[in-house]
Image (cartoon, rainbow, N blue to C red):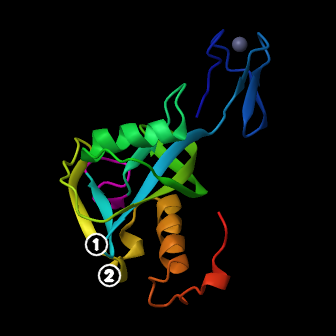
Amino acid sequence: MITHCPHCSSTALDWPSTKQFTCRECGFVLFLNIAAAVGVIIECQGKLLFGVRKHEPQRGKLDLPGGFVDQGETAEQALQRELQEEIGLTIPAARYLYSFPNRYPYLGITYDTLDLIFLVQLVGFPPLQAGDDLAELLWLDRDSIDLEQIGFTSLRQAVQRYLTESGGLSSGKPLTSAGCRPF
Ligand SMILES: [Zn+2]
């Protein structure tokens, strides 16, 4: 929570909405915009790739490769960079699927993000190298994924939707071609 004006240090702050504050002393206005992030579902031979988080938040939980989009970057560039940094993988292309909002608490501040989810489908298992933020990498069978072990709500929703719509959740109804939703 912000308690002081970053311009004049006054504590006379007004919050007309959760998205902005104004300083009654100097008139400073700050908009708290959401951050963009990317997450990628990587599928190969009926398995999905997950990382196990080494650090907070959600330490020890399953995660999808991805991360925040940097200034000046496209989502596609961020995805390529994060895949290289996190798992040592270079991919030719990824398909955008859908987005889910997320909250990312870090050192006392909660960042509201919009996670853009992409899909990469591989024919063969590539050599991978877990980056510094991941304890290990796991290829999990589509049928045996415990959604509760996925740390972030947005990524859990994304994986659940993907498994359901591509016919992989045992409780989900396999889609016919007529049931496929266009992206
Ligand atoms: Zn001020």
- Above/below status of 44 relative to 7: below
Q: Is mark 1 within 8 Å of ligand 1?
A: no
What residue sits right under mark 1 in the picture?
140
- Which residue is at 52% across, 79% downward? 164
**Residue 57 in magenta?**
yes
Give the percent coordinates (x, y) of residue 11.
Answer: 67, 20
The x, y position of residue 24, in whole percent, is: 80, 17
Give the structural element (helix, strand or loop) at label 1. strand
Horizontally, residue 66 falls left or right of residue 154, namely: left
The x, y position of residue 14, in whole percent, is 77, 28
Q: Say if the magenta span includes residue 137.
A: no
Residue that label 2 marks:
144
Amino acid type of the residue tagged 2 in the rendering? Ser
Circle 1: residue type: Leu
Q: Which residues are magenta?
A: 54-63
Is there CB contact under 8 Å for labels 1 and 2?
yes
Q: Is residue 103 left or right of residue 26?
A: left
Task: From the image, give the main secondary structure of the stretch colored magenta.
Answer: loop
